[in-house]
Image (tube, rainbow, N blue to C red):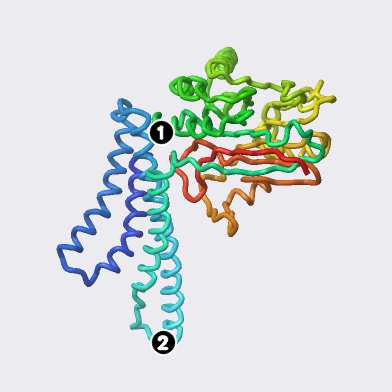
Amino acid sequence: MRLVIMIALLLAFDLYAFQAIRSIAQDWQPLLKNILYTIYWAVPVALIVWIIANTSGSADNLDKNTHTVIRTIFFIAYASKLLIVGVLLIDDLRRLVTLAYHQMAGDKALRPGRSKFMAQMGLLIAGIPFVSLLYGMVRNPYRYRVFREKVSIKNLPDALQGLKIVQISDIHSGSFLLKEPVRNAVDIINKEEADLVFFTGDLVNSKAKEAAPFVDVFDKIEARHGVYSVLGNHDYGDYADWPDEQAKRENMLELENTHRKMGWDLLRNENRIIDIKGENVAVIGVENYSAHLRFPKYGDLGKAQSGTENTSLKLLLSHDPSHWEEEVTEKFKDIALTFSGHTHGMQFGIEIPGWIKWSPIKYVYKQWAGLYKRNEQFLYVNRGLGYLGYPGRVGILPEVTVIELSKV
């Protein structure tokens, strides 16, 4: 019965949105009109078949990639139709007000029709996300962009002048539809010949096994003084259903082993002191710590930075950028530079260097992409290497960060 109700609501929604199609095509040749109508109704029919196939188990033999692509295409189609419906509702409100006015004025014969202009406006507005989301899915998932920043650190030792750090974040290996294009990111990283490479969390979506196919990709990353990593909120397995706590613990052990296989030094509320040209550099890795209640606070920065008091430079890896203002800038003012990720730049926004940088995520995270400074402390928020949910990006491209340190 619930399936029948769902299909009925779906058809009612499509029938209402169809009024815009019928309005603009009313003067078309019959052949063109029939082609347009067939294309329109093919989508809800296909969705109904898909719903039934999933409900009956007939779609269970399809692979993950096929499921993801089909779900995304339907999402794009109906998100766009929702905008059409919104414009049609405004038009119907206009018609209702006009009808009521003329009824009160005694002109009972008037029946205001639907505005062809409003129908065209609805289709135009819906076409923008429809085209951009499809383009973002086809063109942008592996279109890696290098972001370069020079960061001037107060009292930076001369020996560390020009220290080059490459950062990546939010791989979300369980989301990748393709493997080979990911190797391009590793080539970009290695081409930089970095002193240090940092990964700031979310290797997987929920389970460690998602990363297994990519071990032979990311184990190729090279840096003079090592590759260091931390966990993100998705890495703990909190978003998966486990038969018991033991299974969840074993998943974490498998994830830790994956980092080792890739040659990444996973820091869990701990640090490494590295000798670089005679200067001690502290790489501090804290577990996930968020100022937002919906994300966990596993991090213990006091513990993580213990023993780094006499180092020349402190670099912090902390997945969630809200940690920076919540604790780092308040209690740990000797940490010069923090590296974070988590936001993905929402995978959607507008970026024109030197002109505009905007994404809806800015209304949730004050620091959401790029370099930020407070007093003598810096934060860099990486836009993410992978994607989650929507398998693409619009405006906010996947990022490889290259930071070069300099002296003030």
| Secondary structure type for disc 1 | loop
Q: Nearer the viewer, residue 250 or 109?
A: 250
Q: Which residue is identified by label 1?
A: 181
Q: Nearer the viewer, residue 152 or 132?
A: 152
| Secondary structure type for disc 2 | loop
Residue 16 occupies quadrant: bottom left
Return the residue found at the far left: 31
Location of residue 106 with respect to 253 vertically, above or below: below
Location of residue 68 with respect to 73 vertically, above or below: above
At which x and y percent is residue 69? 36, 38
Residue type, label 2: Gly
Location of residue 166 with respect to 255 vertically, above or below: below
From the viewer's perspective, tell me whether residue 130 is left or right of residue 234: left
Q: Residue at x 74, y 43 (%)?
A: 152
Residue type, label 1: Pro
Q: Residue at x 73, y 21 (%)?
A: 275
Q: Which residue is identified by label 2?
A: 106
From the viewer's perspective, tell me whether residue 303 is left or right of residue 95: right
Position of the N terminus by quadrant: top left
- Whether residue 192 is visible, yes or no, is yes
Mark 2 or 1, closer to the camera: 1
Q: Residue at x 53, y 19 (%)?
A: 262
